[in-house]
Image (tube, rainbow, N blue to C red):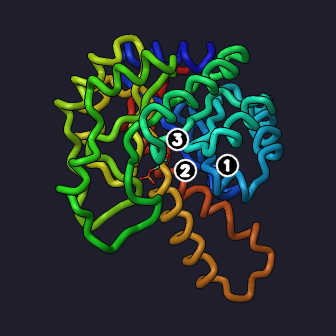
Amino acid sequence: MKLLDWFDKARKESFAIGAFNIDSLEIFKAVIMAAVHRKSPVIVEFSPGEVGYFGIKNIVDMVKNAREEFEIPIFLNLDHGKPKNAVVEAVDLGGFDEVHFDGSDLDFSTNARQAKEIVDSAHKREIVVEGEINKIGGSSEVHLEEIDLELLKKSYTKPEEAQKFVEETGVDILAPAIGNVHGTFPVDPDLDIDLLAKISDAVGEKFLSLHGGSGIPIVQVKDAIRRGKIVKVNVNTELRATYKDALEEKLAEHPDEYKIYDLMPDVVEAVAAVVENKIEVFGSNDKV
Ligand code: G3H
């Protein structure tokens, strides 16, 4: 089954597929291990910073090898790809199942025009394209500062703009801003599920993706999947934070160890536990 078939299945059966950001080899191993264990399809995704660290060709090879080794669907997504040329590079390289073009810094019509150009070439290669109109704020880190909720509300996605954008561009999936932010903050986000449901109606057959999956209360994530028909949830910060904490703990426990890979199995397990929990919340377990 291709990624779009999985999105279709997810919407019909009210579950979502986790899209997990990969910023180390250990996180990659953890995500695959968790998905295999929970018999779940999984999307591994790389933001521009993560692509820069790994190298785009290494990413494609790493995912190809994992697909050959494990009998679960493993999809590859370019996350928040920008500028347009970087997305085109991923499309032309092959190996990606999805590219997310983040044109949210551009004005609506430039964003739509560039998204359409990407769709035209990506669809020829059967690559799914995700679009974004309103910037999803924050960054994938543990934030100690407060977030300005009133300011955030000003950038929520409007259903009519979402409809116009998907119609003009032909993107397959849209990432709306409905109170979701990247990273974790002292106060949890409060998603506007009513707005999400309206956006879902407005985009019709097109799919919706929920960014900023870290720190959103479980009940809201489940509601976004059930009422808002979200089929993909992106998670990064909780994996990064778990990795960092687990690694710091192991290094402190073994100050004389120089074979760092000997310390890594516990780190991988700690991250895998977080991923398994997300898979359970998203309801994608036992779908393979
Ligand atoms: O595209 C990436 C995600 O939206 C990650 O968000 O760091 O809040 O989990 P997060």
Amino acid under label 2?
Answer: Ala
Q: Mark number for residue 102?
A: 3
Amino acid under label 1?
Answer: Lys
Going from N to C along the chain, the mark reached first, 3 or 2, is 3
Label 3, label 2: how far apart the Cα atoms are = 28 Å
Total label count? 3
Going from N to C along the chain, the mark reached first, 1 or 2, is 1
Q: Nearer the viewer, mark 3 or mark 1?
A: 3
- Residue 225, x across and y down, in percent: 31, 28
Within-10-Å neighbours for mark 1: few <14, some 14–19, many 20+ = some
The residue at the point 39 percent across, 48 percent down is 136
Ligand 1 closer than 8 Å to label 1 CB: no
**Residue sitting nearer the eye, 26 or 79:** 79
Q: Choose top left, top right, bottom left or bottom right for residue 31.
A: top right
Q: Mark number for residue 137?
A: none
- Residue 257, x across and y down, in percent: 75, 82
Q: Secondary structure at mark 2?
A: helix
The residue at the point 58 percent across, 20 percent down is 3
| Residue 7 placement, left or right of 15 | right
**Residue sitting nearer the eye, 240 or 81:** 81
Question: Does any portion of residue 260 appear in the rendered image?
Answer: yes
Within-10-Å neighbours for mark 2: few <14, some 14–19, many 20+ = many
* Residues under numbered marks 1 and 2 in contact, where contact means CB atoms less than 8 Å apart: yes
| Residue 198 placement, left or right of 109 | left
Q: Choose top left, top right, bottom left or bottom right for residue 66.
A: top right
Check disc 1 and report the residue beneath it. 29
The residue at the point 49 percent across, 28 percent down is 112
| Residue 250 placement, left or right of 16 | right
Check disc 2 and report the residue beneath it. 272
What quarter of the picture does the N terminus occupy? top right
